[in-house]
Image (tube, rainbow, N blue to C red):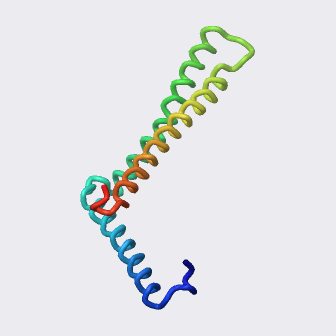
Amino acid sequence: MSDEQMTPKERRLKQEKEYTRKIGAKESRRIKGKARKDETVWFGLGMIGVVGWSVAIPTLIGIAIGIWIDRTWPSRFSWVLMLLILGVALGSVNAWYWVRRAQEDIIKDGDDNSQPQGEA
């Protein structure tokens, strides 16, 4: 039923219901935030560091192995360059996995908190 077809009383009840839902969602976020006090700004910066290291470590390993191969078996191909690209690619896939997993956890937590208390 559209808003034009509703009586003023029905419109007011609909607005009250929507307002109550919004307040409930804000309150559940506030409670969730209080329960997760360890997740401060420093925690967020640390997570950024984890994603960065998940790219940097495979890249550095690829460079090290490439240098060793180039020194041990010289060829016209640069193993450092090829393994650098491979390390960046593997690290990017690894970082994407961790970010996607964290996003799924956030979405799951949001879905758990969006249900009213009596329906869970």
In this view, the residue farthest toward the right is: 76
Q: Residue at x 51, y 24 (%)?
A: 61
Image position of 55 with respect to 99: above or below:
above
Residue 48: image location, x then y, percent: 44, 47
Q: Is residue 87 above or below residue 102?
A: above
Q: Is residue 42 left or right of residue 52?
A: left
Quarter of the image for residue 40 reads: bottom left
At x 64% / y 8%, what residue is drawn?
A: 73
Front residue of this view, candidates 120 and 114: 120
In the image, is residue 90 above or below residue 106? above
Q: Which residue is the extreme one toward the bottom?
A: 8
Q: Position of residue 36 (x, y in %)?
A: 27, 55
Q: Quadrant of the C terminus?
A: bottom left
Question: Outermost residue toward the top?
Answer: 73
Q: Is residue 54 above or below residue 105?
A: above
x then y, percent, for residue 2: 57, 80
Q: Which quadrant is the N terminus positioned in? A: bottom right
Side (left or right) of 112 relative to 96:
left
Quick check: 31 left or right of 17? left
Picture coordinates of residue 49, whole percent (x, y) = 43, 44
Residue drawn at (61%, 28%) of the image: 84
Q: Name the side, left or right, on which 2 lies relative to 27.
A: right
Q: Nearer the viewer, residue 5 or 51?
A: 5
> What residue do we see at 60% from left, 19% from top?
66
